[in-house]
Image (cartoon, helix red, strand yellow):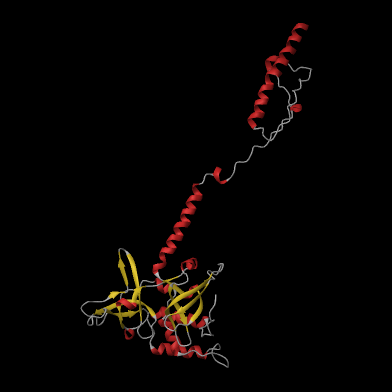
Amino acid sequence: MTGQAPSLLFRFTDTEVAKMEEVLRDLNAMPKHPVIQGLTDDFNASPDRSGDGKVPVQYNQVRNWFQNRRSAQSRKMMVPPVAEEHHPVDGSYSGNSSLDGGHVQFEAKSAINGAWYDVAAFLSHRFIGTKDPEVLVRFTWLGPEEDEWINVRKCVRLRSLPCEAAECVAVLPGDLILCFQEGKEQALYFDARVLDAQRRRHDVRGCRCRFLVRYDHDHSEEIVPLRKVCRRPETDFRLQILHASRAAASADAQNVSPVEQKPQKAHKMMDVNTAEVTVVRNPDQGGPSDKPAAPLPAAPAGTHGDSVSDVQMGNVEVIPKVEAANEAHDDNMNVGA
C-alpha cells in the first residue's frame, strides 16, 4: 500500500470526550455557544493542555465534535420527527421514513462545507424554475439556524452504513465510501474512493485492516482504519452472497453421514488361545471326570484379513469334535461296568 501518511492531527483526550458525551446526553441537542465556550475553556485549563508543548483546544474543534458525532450508536438511533415551528402547508417529514415496516434513513450533503450529515427531518420542498427540486433539511444534532435547502437529486441519498469488524470484506478498491476526515479545524464525513486495501488478521480488538483512500473534495490521500469507513448500502449484496455461501457450506457439512465423514476402521484380529479353553460338562452327564479334557486342536494363525465372523465360525466347527470325544468316553465307562 502506498500513499502519504497523514500528518500529526489534533486529538481530544479520553477525559474530554467523556465530558462532551455527558453534555450531549444531558441536552440531547446541539449545545449553545456559552456551553461550547465553557467546555473549551475548561479543557485548556487542564494539565493536559496547559504548559509548553501542549496543543490547546479551539472553539471550532469542540463545536465540530458535537456537529459530527456519528458513532455507530448514534447512527443506529431512530431520531423522532423534529417539531416544526414555521412549517409550510406541506408539513415536515422525518429523515427516518418507514417503508413496508422497515426504516429508511437518509443523509444530506451540506452546500457550506461539502460534508455529509444525517438527516433529522425534511421540513419543506420547493421547485425553482426547471431546476431539480430542493428540500429544506434539518440536520441531526444541529439547530434550526443550520437548516439548508438541499438539491434532492445530487445531495440526498440513503444513509451510509458503519462497518462492523466482520464487514471489512465488503470494502473493495474502487468503492465510493463515506470517510471520517480529522483535521486541525474540523472533523467531518466526506466522500472518498478506496484506492487500496491491506488485509490483516483480526484479533480481540476487531478488524486491523487498513485502507488507502482519496477524498473527493480536496483529493488528499490518507490511510485509515475500518472504524472511519462507512460503506454504501449498494454493497449489501456482497455480504448477502458471503453469508449465503457460508450457510450452504455449513448445511453440506451437516448433511454428510458419519460414515462419509470418518473412514471405517478395519476389524482388529482376535487371537484365540485354544490351550486355555476347557470343556464344561452338562449336569446329566454325571460328576466330573478324573481325566483332563481333551485339548482342542490348535487354530491356525490368523491373518489381518480374518474377520470376527470367521473366528466365531471356527469355534462352532470345534463343538461337534468335543461332543464326539465325550460320547466315546461314556461308552468306555459303560463297557467297563
Q: Is residue 205 left or right of residue 244?
A: right
Return the residue nearer the eye: 200 or 148: 200
The answer to whether residue 96 of the structure is visible from this angle is yes
Q: Quadrant of residue 107?
A: bottom left
Count of residue discs: 0
Q: Quadrant of residue 117?
A: bottom left
Q: Is residue 174 left or right of residue 313?
A: left
Return the residue nearer the eye: 34 or 108: 108
Residue under the point 30% across and 67% down: 98
Residue under the point 69% across and 22% down: 318
Residue extending furthest left?
89
The C terminus, quarter of image: top right
Across and down, in percent, residue 176 comes to 42, 73
Across and down, in percent, residue 22 comes to 45, 80
Q: Is residue 153 left or right of residue 188?
A: left
Across and down, in percent, residue 264 comes to 60, 41
Residue under the point 41% across and 87% down: 35
In the rendered view, would you say 265 is above or below 178?
Answer: above
Residue under the point 42% across and 61% down: 240
Across and down, in percent, residue 262 comes to 58, 45
The N terminus, quarter of image: bottom right
